[in-house]
Amino acid sequence: ALVNFLTSKQLLPGSWANAISNQLYSIQTATASTTQTQAGGTKITAAAVAVTTANNNDAVTMPKGYAGLEIFIANLSAATLGVFPAVGDTMFPSAVNDVITQTLSKNAVYKCINVTATGAATWYQIESAT
């Protein structure tokens, strides 16, 4: 694919442009899983996600992180939300594969900044004040 890109007269292949658009502008409505584990969490598949939760710590699981990836999560419920990383990733300041809590009725931006040579990513949470 890279060879075709380099020899193409297009500035950007259509498939790349579609993937970039999907990452920047995709929207998901989700219900957090009552299986409050990394494997059982509802999978996050979009850039902006509106989540409802039935119980404190119902879970969602982030996609595999890469440097620069940013995901917005709105917790629309009066219950805390458990946010797990993908397997092998970290939600700072937790340990690898551990959950981080998003406060009830709060919004948060999750930014992936650090990625190691082995592909392990670290996510940082910026939660709204109100």
Image: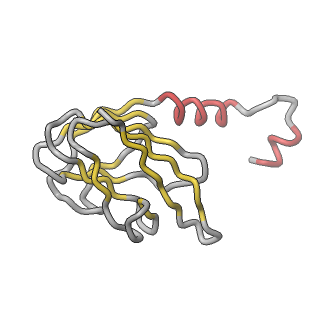
The spot of residue 108 in percent (x, y) is 37, 40
The spot of residue 7 in percent (x, y) is 88, 40
Residue 94 placement: quadrant? bottom left
Q: In which quarter of the image is the C terminus?
A: top left
Residue at the front extreme?
129
Residue 46 placement: quadrant? top left
The spot of residue 64 in percent (x, y) is 48, 56
Residue 123 or 86: which is nearer the viewer?
Answer: 123
The spot of residue 50 in percent (x, y) is 30, 33
Residue 52 placement: quadrant? top left
**For the point 53% across and 52% down, which residue is it?**
112
Residue 2 or 60: which is nearer the viewer?
Answer: 60
- Up the image or down, 82 lies above or below 29; here it is below
**For the point 58% across and 66% down, which residue is it?**
119
Q: What is the image's colouring?
A: secondary structure
**For the point 47% across and 53% down, which residue is it?**
124
- Up the image or down, 45 lies above or below 13; here it is below
Residue 128 or 100: which is nearer the viewer?
Answer: 128
- Up the image or down, 101 lies above or below 120; here it is above
Determine whether, in the image, residue 3 is placed left or right of residue 27. Answer: right
**For the point 83% across and 48% down, which residue is it?**
3
